[in-house]
Image (tube, rainbow, N blue to C red):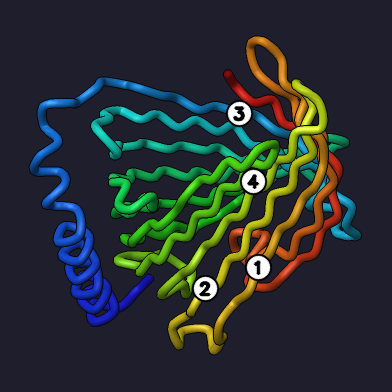
Amino acid sequence: MTSGRGVRAGRGRAMQVAALVLGVMWPTLAGAQSAVEFVPDTRFHIDAEHLSNDDIRYDWDANFFGEIDVIGWKGGRATVTGNYEVVMGNQLRRFDPNQGNYLLEGTVTQRIAGIDVGGQFHHISRHLSDRIKFAAVDWNQLGLRVGTQVTHGKLDLMTRADFRTTVANSLVDYDREVEADLKVRYAIRPRVSAMSNTRLRLVDTDDTRNRGILVGIRTEGGVHLQGSGGAIELFLAAERRIDPYPTQFAYATFLAAGFRVVGR
């Protein structure tokens, strides 16, 4: 658990981040009230992948993801994001769910000169399944999001970066975090595209566990098959994951093969 001084410092940084975001976005938001839409867009997907790793705790990883633009206006939106991740091994049975991890985010972004800029609340809570866990494992962060999307002929490119500071945490030693995504899709045929996704995660820690900056990375490549009601992605991936088990502090490296079903 963070100390009182750490929480106060986190709150101070959070207020600075919130003031910066509000200062950047206020002129545009103030003039956007006449063009508000309710639930202009939604995005959903489920995925599952088989992990290649010597540790019997990591056989399968699956995610159930949903994102809703609750309110939209000219060039901007307020979005709620949720994700449930289940990790399965083979310790107690052939298919043994040992983790259930929850993500909840709220973001408000505004497009300025072709770039989406905004503020973010980020929460993660991690749990063990069929195993004793006395301590809570979670963290709350506030931050800044910057991103853009570009289409050039057959090429679609999406980049996004989050810069977050921790305002409260339990058990983990995460202080600040940068998470950057790069998604590329190239159309081979009208309904068939090559795709690659890369995510880089940098975590600056406090001094409670004598760790420095943690580096995690995931990259995947595959094919995107578009249908009339959605799409299926087949991919191969490699990942270096930070703290893959909720109550242990180390890295793990995975190779994976999986699929993703993407909503319309």
- Residue 99's tag is 4
Amino acid beneath label 1: Gly
Residue name at image x 63 percent, y 36 percent: 63
**222 to 11, vertically: above or below:** above
Q: Earlier in the sequence, mark 1 or mark 2?
A: 2
Amino acid beneath label 2: Val
Residue name at image x 34 percent, y 61 percent: 144
Q: Secondary structure at mark 4?
A: strand
Q: 83 or 4: which is nearer to us? A: 83
Amino acid beneath label 4: Gln
Q: Residues within 10 Å of mark 1 (few under 14, many from 20)?
A: some
Q: Are marks 3 and 1 in contact (CB under 8 Å)?
A: no
Residue 101 placed where, x, y %?
55, 45
| Tag in front: 4 or 3 | 3
Q: Give the alpha-carbon distance from disc 3 to disc 1, as whole Å.
A: 23 Å
Q: Quadrant of residue 249?
A: bottom right
Q: Give the alpha-carbon distance from disc 4 to disc 3, as whole Å.
A: 20 Å
For disc 1, the marked residue is 216
For disc 2, the marked residue is 203
Q: 195 or 47: which is nearer to us? A: 195
For disc 3, the marked residue is 45
Q: Residues within 10 Å of mark 3 (few under 14, many from 20)?
A: some
Q: Secondary structure at mark 3?
A: strand
